[in-house]
Structure formats: structure tokens, C-alpha cells
Amino acid sequence: MNSLKTTILLAGLTGLLLAIGYSFGGTRGMTIMFVLSMIMNFASYWYSDKIVLKMYGAREVTPQQAPDLIRMVSGLAQKAKLPMPKVYIIDTDVPNAFATGRDPDHAAVAVTTGIMRALNYEELEGVVAHELAHVKNRDTLISTIVATIAGVITMIAQMAQFAAIFGRGSDDEDGGVGGIFEFIFLVVLAPIAATLIQMGISRVREFQADETGGLVSGNPLALASALQKIENYARHRVMEEATPATSHLFIINPFSGVGGWMTNLFSTHPATAQRVAKLQELAKKMR
């Protein structure tokens, strides 16, 4: 069911992009947008992991540099029946983690130095299992595609707004009802729709990764405890390197403490309380 929801939402996001292209230039504009999305998705498929890891200054570690972490990742990867991913550490005091890579054979798991200090062994194991679940469920590729298309839509909306302010004059023949509706669609409605679709996909994948991670680690309650701790830190301190475009990659939205209820309403992650409740239900079933 989750896979079906993701497919529908992805189709909706792509359809929104094509609709923007059509409103700009008819059939030709729609074709251009389709080709553009394919080119960007191709680039994202091959290089997104390298880009995001470099963006956060992540450094790959060896068994000699981080023996306990490597041993933990290796053991969980075997339980999940996954190839051993590359392991990275991000030097920041804010606890968080994410996974990236186009497929299980080219995956990477990154954790912050802050998360290794803030969590106990079982909690960190739950977090790593959650990230490996994203790899197992192919969420890392889906997240990249979603972020790329949503980013294109936002960029086009900004261009349309700029063109409306500095381009057409007030006496333009196209400035009637149709022009006003087109402006509202491009500048206001399209980015909001893209955000809502991105939220829908991310939230579905987070719930599924929590469940898979809880099963792999064998301790859903430890993962639940880890989520609560990470969110508490995120509410009091924002990771300086974090960007809205990559916030959906992390196990907890790094901007949880910014913007109040409005930001939480449009967050790419489900409410932590809901995630904890589902993990508690899973723990009961496992007993």
C-alpha cells in the first residue's frame, strides 16, 4: 500500500511539472519540462550521494577509525541482508543521521558526532537500522527524485515571479483573467502543491523505515527513545549546515524547532509522537 501511495504521489509531482511546462509554452513547453526533469533525475541518480555528503562535510571512516560504529553497521546490514554501505561521520554537535546512495550496492550511512554522544548503544543501533531500512526500501533514490522535481518547480515559480515583476507592463494584452490565474498557479499554487506531495512521500517512507528498522534491530522501543532525544535536540539547536532541500533525508527534520506550528504543519516528517506510538505498537506485537 505504501509503494502504491508513493507511485501515485510521484506521478502527481511529475504531472504538476508537466502542467507548468504546458502553461508556459503549450505542448512544446511540456516537452521541454519533461526532458529537463529526465536530465536532472539522471544527474541526481549518479551524483546526488556525493553532492549531499560533500555539502555536510561528511568524512568516510574505516574500521580502524571507528571500530564500534563500523561493527554496528556491518552487523545490522547482515541482518537486513544488505551489502555493507560506506560509513561517514559529520562533525557537528547536533544529533542526526541520514542515508544516501542510488541503490543498496552504492549506499552510504552518515551519522553526526553529536548523535554518537547523545544516544546509548541500543538507541544508536535503532537509528542505524532505520537508515539501512531506507536503503533496503530504495527510499534514498525516491527522495532524490522528489527533491529534484520539487526543486525545479520552486525555481520555475521564482522565475515566473521575477518575470511578472520586471517583465510585462500593466498594459500587456495578456494581463486579463487568464494571465492572473496563470500567475497564481505558477507562483503560489504550484510550489505549495509540490511541497504537499513531497511531504506525503517523505512521511509514508518514514513510517515504513521506522517499522523495518525496528524489526531489523529487534528493539523498536530503543528507536522510539532515540527519535524523542534527537527531536528534543533539534528543537533547541539547528544544524548550521542543514538546508530545506535536504531536510527530508534526516531521521528527524533538522528544522523542527524553527517556525513554530506552521513549520511543523508543512514538515516532511510525521509527528514524532505518532512515530513513537507506532513503534510501541510494533514492540507489543513482537513480544
Image (cartoon, rainbow, N blue to C red):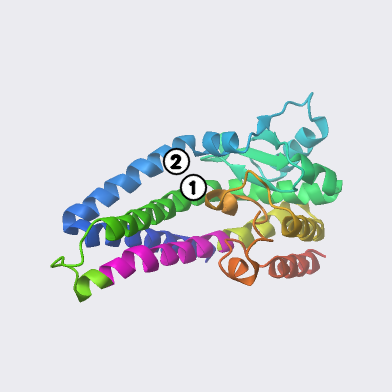
Location of mark 1 (residue): 144
Is 182 within the magenta?
A: yes
Magenta stretch: dominant SS? helix
**In magenta segment, residue 136:** no
Is residue 137 visible to us here?
no
Rounded to the nearest angstrom, the CA distance separating label 2 from label 1 is 6 Å
On-image quarter of the C terminus: bottom right
Give the image quarter of residue 280.
bottom right
For mark 1, does the 10 Å Cα neighbourhood hold few (<14), some (14 to 19), or many (20 or more) residues? many
| Residue type at tag 2 | Ser
- Disc 1 marks a residue whose amino acid type is Thr
Kindly tell me whether residue 68 is visible in this rendering: yes
Up-down relation of residue 83 to residue 186 (above or below): above
Residue sticking out furthest to the right: 120
| Residue appearing at x 22%, y 69% in the figure | 179
Image point (49%, 60%), residue name: 198
Q: Where 31 sits versus 8, above or below?
A: above
Badge 2 crowding class, 10 Å Cα cut-off, few under 14, some 14 to 19, many 20 or more, is many
**Contact (CB < 8 A) between labels 2 and 1?**
yes
Question: Tag on residue 44?
Answer: 2
The magenta span reads 181-203
User: Is 219 in front, or is 157?
Assistant: 157
